[in-house]
C-alpha cells in the first residue's frame, strides 16, 4: 500500500470504532415514574435449571432516569439500597464497572447533566442526551465534553443492536476476554424497546459456580423480552435490583466486614456488594 492509502485506512479504522446509534426516547411525561417489574423464570437450552431474574420497564424515561455515583462520589462505593435511599429512587439497580481495589469508576459517567469523569476508553456506553435521544455505542470523549449528555454510563459489550445480538461484533472492538463472554454469571443490562421505553434486565446466578448466563445467552434472552437495544452493565456479585425496600435478586457475595449490615434475603448468608454507581428510576 502507498503511504496515503495507509493513512486513509488508519482514519477509517479510527472512525469506524467511534460509531454509535441514536433512538428517540419515549416522550411520555408524568410526575412519577411508571414502572413495571416482571419476574423471569425460564428454561434455557443446555441449562439444567431455570434462569430467574427481573425485567424492569419504565414507560416515561425522560425525567425519571439518572445514573448516580455512590453518595461519596467516584471513587467510592455503597450498597445499592443505601444509594437508592440517598437519591430517593423508586427502583435502583447497580450500574457501571469499577475497580474493586481502588473503587474507581471505570469509563465515562455523566449524572444529571454533570460530567463526573470522562476518560478515554474503547468500551461502549449507554446514555440519554439532553435533546431526548438514547445514544448507545462508542462515543468519543469530545462529544461527551460538548455537554450533550444528561446521563451516560460505561458498559462492557454492546449486547443488542437493532433487535439483533451484537456480542461478536462488539467483542472485536472492545477486546474483551473470552472468559468474560463465555462464563455463566449473574448479568445486568440496560436498554430500550421499539417504543423507546427504558428496560433493565437482571439475571440471577453464581459466578463461582458458573451459574447464570453467558453473554450470548443473555443477549438472546433480553431480545425475547423486548429489548431492541441493550448494553451489558456490571454483573456477577454486583447484581442488585432494589425496589420498594426489597432486594429482588439473589445475591452472591458473602457477608464480611464492609457489607455485613446489608443482608440479602436470599440465599442466606449473602450480603449486598458495595458498588460505585447505580441506575436510579425516580
Ligand atoms: C435523535 O435520534 C434520531 C434517530 O432515532 C435522529 O433521527 C435524530 O437526528 C436524533 N436527534 C439529534 C438531535 O441528533
Ligand atoms: C421453568 O420454566 C418454564 C418456562 O420456560 C416453566 O414452564 C416452568 O414452570 C419452570 N419451572 C420451574 C421449576 O419453575
Ligand atoms: C449446547 O451444548 C452442545 C454440546 O455441548 C453444543 O454443541 C451447543 O452449541 C449448545 N447449545 C447452546 C445453545 O449453547
Image (cartoon, rainbow, N blue to C red):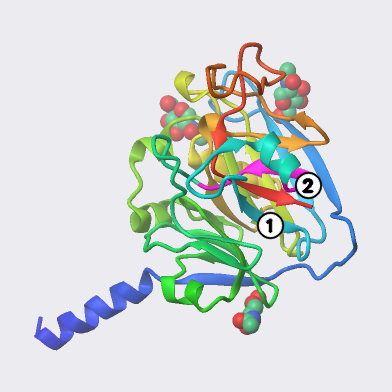
The spot of residue 195 in percent (x, y) is: 76, 64
The numbered mark at residue 159 is none
Quarter of image, ligand 2: top right
Residue 103 lies, with reference to residue 193, above or below; the image says above
Q: CA distance from mark 1 to mark 2?
A: 11 Å
Mark 1 crowdedness (10 Å alpha carbons): few <14, some 14-19, many ≥20: many
**Is 282 on the left or on the right of 105, as rendered?**
right
Q: Farthest residue toward the front?
A: 72
**Is 17 on the left or on the right of 226, as rendered?**
left
The residue at the point 80 percent across, 32 percent down is: 245
The residue at the point 47 percent across, 46 percent down is: 75
Front residue of 203 and 246: 246
Quarter of the N terminus within the rendering:
bottom left
Front residue of 31 and 128: 31
The numbered mark at residue 88 is 2
The spot of residue 92 in percent (x, y) is: 71, 43
**Does the magenta-highlighted stretch encompass residue 240?**
no
Task: Mark yes or no: residue 213 visible.
Answer: no
Magenta residues?
Answer: 87-96
Front residue of 168 and 190: 190
The residue at the point 53 percent across, 17 percent down is: 256
Q: Quadrant of residue 258?
A: top right
Find out if the beta carbon at label 1 lies less than 8 Å from the nearest ligand 1 atom.
no
Classify mark 2: helix, strand or loop: loop
Q: Farthest residue toward the bottom?
A: 4
Which residue, given by chain and number where applicable, does mark 1 sit on? 66
Q: Farthest residue toward the top?
A: 268
The spot of residue 8 in percent (x, y) is: 23, 83
Disc 1 vs disc 2: which is toward the camera? 2
The residue at the point 32 percent across, 51 percent down is: 175
Amino acid at each position: 500500500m502507498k503511504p496515503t492509502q495507509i493513512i486513509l485506512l488508519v482514519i477509517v479504522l479510527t472512525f469506524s470504532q467511534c460509531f454509535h446509534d441514536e433512538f428517540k426516547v419515549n416522550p411520555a411525561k408524568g410526575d412519577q415514574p411508571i414502572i413495571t417489574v416482571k419476574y423471569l423464570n425460564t428454561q434455557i437450552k443446555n441449562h439444567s435449571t431455570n434462569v430467574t431474574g427481573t425485567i424492569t420497564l419504565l414507560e416515561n424515561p425522560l425525567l425519571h432516569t439518572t445514573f448516580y455515583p455512590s453518595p461519596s462520589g467516584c471513587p467510592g462505593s455503597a450498597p445499592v439500597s443505601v444509594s437508592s435511599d440517598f437519591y430517593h429512587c423508586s427502583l435502583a439497580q447497580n450500574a457501571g464497572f469499577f475497580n474493586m481495589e481502588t473503587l474507581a469508576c471505570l469509563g465515562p459517567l455523566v449524572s444529571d447533566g454533570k460530567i463526573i469523569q470522562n476518560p478515554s476508553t474503547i468500551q461502549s456506553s449507554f446514555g440519554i442526551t439532553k435533546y431526548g435521544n438514547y445514544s448507545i455505542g462508542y462515543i468519543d470523549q469530545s462529544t461527551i465534553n460538548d455537554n450533550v449528555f444528561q446521563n451516560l454510563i460505561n458498559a462492557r459489550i454492546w449486547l443488542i443492536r437493532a433487535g439483533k445480538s451484537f456480542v461478536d461484533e462488539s467483542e472485536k472492538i472492545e477486546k474483551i476476554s473470552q472468559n468474560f463472554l463465555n462464563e455463566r454469571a449473574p448479568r445486568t443490562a440496560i436498554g430500550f424497546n421499539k417504543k423507546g421505553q427504558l428496560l433493565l434486565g437482571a439475571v440471577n446466578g453464581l459466578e463461582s459456580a458458573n451459574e447464570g448466563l453467558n453473554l450470548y445467552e443473555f443477549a438472546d434472552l433480553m431480545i425475547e423480552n423486548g429489548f431492541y437495544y441493550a448494553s451489558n452493565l456490571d454483573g456477577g456479585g454486583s447484581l442488585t435490583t432494589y425496589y420498594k425496600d426489597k432486594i429482588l435478586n439473589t445475591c452472591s457475595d458473602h457477608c464480611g466486614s464492609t457489607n455485613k449490615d446489608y443482608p440479602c434475603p436470599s440465599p442466606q448468608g449473602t450480603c449486598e456488594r458495595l458498588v460505585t454507581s447505580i441506575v436510579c428510576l425516580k
